[in-house]
Image (tube, grey):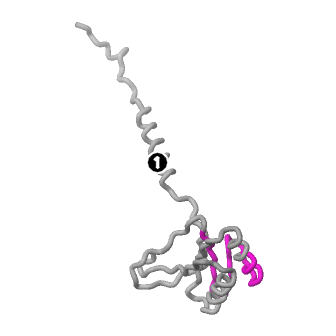
């Protein structure tokens, strides 16, 4: 029978390798599951709300998103466009992709004429589908 010496045979230290592996696996999982960039959401635009239960549209890569601010400025990818430049931009997008979809995000405090102008520009550029985005009452 072996006699144990407490002085020479101390407890083994904790093995932290499995814990470290688990933490790194969780970190990788959450990094892969997280959306880092929300495409074209201008925070100055407040979307109108409705009581219906429709879900809001998510931006697909091929969609052109036009933001209309409260004072009528049109913004695409963070850059403000004048009326003439907006028409040229939409026309060039339609030339590059014939089935170009446009999403119009108009501020609920803006006047309807700003939305109507952007819709007319899209119609003149022969956009096949233009969508108006809004929020339901739950804010989703």
Identify the residue at image location x=58%, y=79%: 130
Residue 135 visible in image = yes
| Residue 12: quadrant of the picture | top left
Identify the residue at image location x=65%, y=84%: 123
Residue 5 shown left or right of residue 120 in the figure = left
Residue 41 shown left or right of residue 18 in the figure = right
Mark 1 neighbour class, 10 Å CA radius: few under 14, some 14 to 19, many 20 or more: few
88, above or below 109, in the image: above
| Residue 118: quadrant of the picture | bottom right
48, above or below 65, in the image: below
| Residue 63 x/y as whole percent | 60, 70
120, above or below 4, in the image: below
Return the residue found at the far top. 1
| Residue 70 x/y as whole percent | 63, 86
> Does the magenta-highlighted stretch encompass residue 78?
yes
| Residue 51: quadrant of the picture | bottom left
Q: Nearer the viewer, residue 120 or 49?
A: 120
| Residue 59 x/y as whole percent | 55, 68
Q: Quadrant of the C terminus?
A: bottom left
Residue 46 shown left or right of residue 71 in the figure = left
Q: Which residues are magenta?
A: 63-89
Return the residue found at the far right. 84
Q: Quadrant of the N terminus?
A: top left
Q: Which residue is mark 1?
A: 29
Residue 73 visible in image = no
| Residue 104 x/y as whole percent | 59, 79
98, above or below 6, in the image: below
Numbered disc 1: secondary structure: helix
């Amino acid at each position: 029978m072996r006699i144990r010496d407490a002085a020479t045979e101390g407890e083994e230290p904790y093995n932290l390798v499995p814990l470290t592996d688990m933490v790194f696996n969780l970190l990788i999982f959450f990094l892969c599951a997280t959306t880092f960039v929300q495409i074209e959401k201008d925070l100055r635009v407040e979307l109108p709300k409705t009581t219906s239960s429709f879900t809001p549209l998510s931006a697909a890569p091929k969609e052109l998103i036009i933001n209309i601010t409260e004072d009528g400025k049109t913004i695409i990818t963070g850059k403000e466009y004048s009326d003439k430049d907006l028409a040229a931009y939409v026309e060039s997008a339609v030339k590059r992709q014939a089935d170009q979809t446009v999403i119009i995000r108009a501020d609920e405090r803006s006047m309807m004429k700003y939305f109507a102008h952007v819709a007319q520009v899209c119609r003149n550029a022969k956009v096949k589908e233009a969508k108006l985005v809004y929020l339901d009452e739950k804010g989703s």
